[in-house]
């Protein structure tokens, strides 16, 4: 089906009602206590096109903890600051291990496999800390600029909650520090990382924010260049191969769009030249991806025939 003829609202509603009736398997993330308080029945979808037409259903106007989806924003910011230099500190290969795994980091001598797993995002935070005068303020300003929503912020209770149980992230950063791949004070880097992970957005805001990745790095609504064409293409490539923990192959196979998930149950995915779509359902499968979110996107790309392949 051609995009001109596509009735996105109808397509979303049809798939939403199918998936709403299906069983809701999985568990809400409870390893971060504050995330465990969310209602597991929540389910929202929003799609925004390059022409700024927005379609939504369910809980798409509720703020969610975007968690690792924010790693795409920190990567964008750091890539613009460091360019090619970035890849000396972090790789671009899928990890094939869980998002918070320590094993591979030891083998790879403190160089994380990619910027979308925890270790990689922590290195990106370290780079931002070294290069920004007021990292917290500049990160939030950047997110507000890209989303065009001035009140976007992070949730302090979630950031505190993450900090209170951040044992694995602490282990990852200590290991990387021992290999010389963390330059700043580890507590400062982790505090900044927890701020990044606890940014909140609605599905509608998510689907608006990442339009630049569907549009060669340029925000199609404001016309502002967020990234060069080449960098935008590369971030999409990293999302396609590394955006879903050790289930990136499965997501590519079943959905066929570049995207990124977070343990808050959100998933955003882009269709270059067409749209960005965001889905939220808090129950996660064993790999840490939203169970219904993945089901919805699989069904959506199957019904509409809209994938990158
Ligand atoms: N803040 C989470 C953590 O560091 C992010 C995990 C995720 O969404 O993948 O464990």
Image: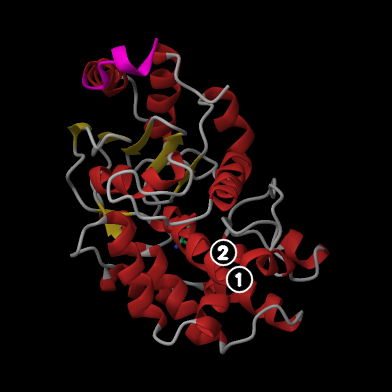
Is 103 rendered above or below residue 48? Answer: below
Magenta residues, as a range?
Answer: 1-9
Quadrant housing residue 144: bottom left
Residue under the image location 34 percent in, 29 percent down: 24
Residue under the image location 58 percent in, 21 percent down: 309
Label 2, residues with CA under 10 Å away: few <14, some 14-19, many ≥20: many
Is 89 rendered above or below residue 30? Answer: below
How far across and down, in percent of the image, does residue 137 sit?
A: 33, 79
Q: How is the image coloured?
A: secondary structure
Identify the residue position indicated by label 2 in the image. 79
Helix, strand or loop at mark 2: helix
The reply to whether residue 72 is visible in this rendering is yes
How far across and down, in percent of the image, does residue 113 sit?
A: 70, 57
In depth, the one of 293 and 23 nearer the eye is 293
Decide: marks 1, 2 in contact (CB < 8 A)?
yes
Query: Seen in the image, is 72 located left or right of residue 62?
Result: right
Give the CA separation, mark 1 to mark 2.
Answer: 5 Å
Magenta-colored stretch includes residue 2: yes
Residue under the image location 48 percent in, 38 percent down: 285
Magenta-colored stretch includes residue 218: no
Identify the residue position indicated by label 1 in the image. 82
Quadrant housing residue 145: bottom left
Label 1, residues with CA under 10 Å away: few <14, some 14-19, many ≥20: few
In depth, the one of 239 and 216 nearer the eye is 216
How far across and down, in percent of the image, does residue 292 sit?
A: 37, 31
How far across and down, in percent of the image, does residue 116 sit?
A: 56, 55
Is 242 rendered above or below residue 65? Answer: above
């Amino acid at each position: 089906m051609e995009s001109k003829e596509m009735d996105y609202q109808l397509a979303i509603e049809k798939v939403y009602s199918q998936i709403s009736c299906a069983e809701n398997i999985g568990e809400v993330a409870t390893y971060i206590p504050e995330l465990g308080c969310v209602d597991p029945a929540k389910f929202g979808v929003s799609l925004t096109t390059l022409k700024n037409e927005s379609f939504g259903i369910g809980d798409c106007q509720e703020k969610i903890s975007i968690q690792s989806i924010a790693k795409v924003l920190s990567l964008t910011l750091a890539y613009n600051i460091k360019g090619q230099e970035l890849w000396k500190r972090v790789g671009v290969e899928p990890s094939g291990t869980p998002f918070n795994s320590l094993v591979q980091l030891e083998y790879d001598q403190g160089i994380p496999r990619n910027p979308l797993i925890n270790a990689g995002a922590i290195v990106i935070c370290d780079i931002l800390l070294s290069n920004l005068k007021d990292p917290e303020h500049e990160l939030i300003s950047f997110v507000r600029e890209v989303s065009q929503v001035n009140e976007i912020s992070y949730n302090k209770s979630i950031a505190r909650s993450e900090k209170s149980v951040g044992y694995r992230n602490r282990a990852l950063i200590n290991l990387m520090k021992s290999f010389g791949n963390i330059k700043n004070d580890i507590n400062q880097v982790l505090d900044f990382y927890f701020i990044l992970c606890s940014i909140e957005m609605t599905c509608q805001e998510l689907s608006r924010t990442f339009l630049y990745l569907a549009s060669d790095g340029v925000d199609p609504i404001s016309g502002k260049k967020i990234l060069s064409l080449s960098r935008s293409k590369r971030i999409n490539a990293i999302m396609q191969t590394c955006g879903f923990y050790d289930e990136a192959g499965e997501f590519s196979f079943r959905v066929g769009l570049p995207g990124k998930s977070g343990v808050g149950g959100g998933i955003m995915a882009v269709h270059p030249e067409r749209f960005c779509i965001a889905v939220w359902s808090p129950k996660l499968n064993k790999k840490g991806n939203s169970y219904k979110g993945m089901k919805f996107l699989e069904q959506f790309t199957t019904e509409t025939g809209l994938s990158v392949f």
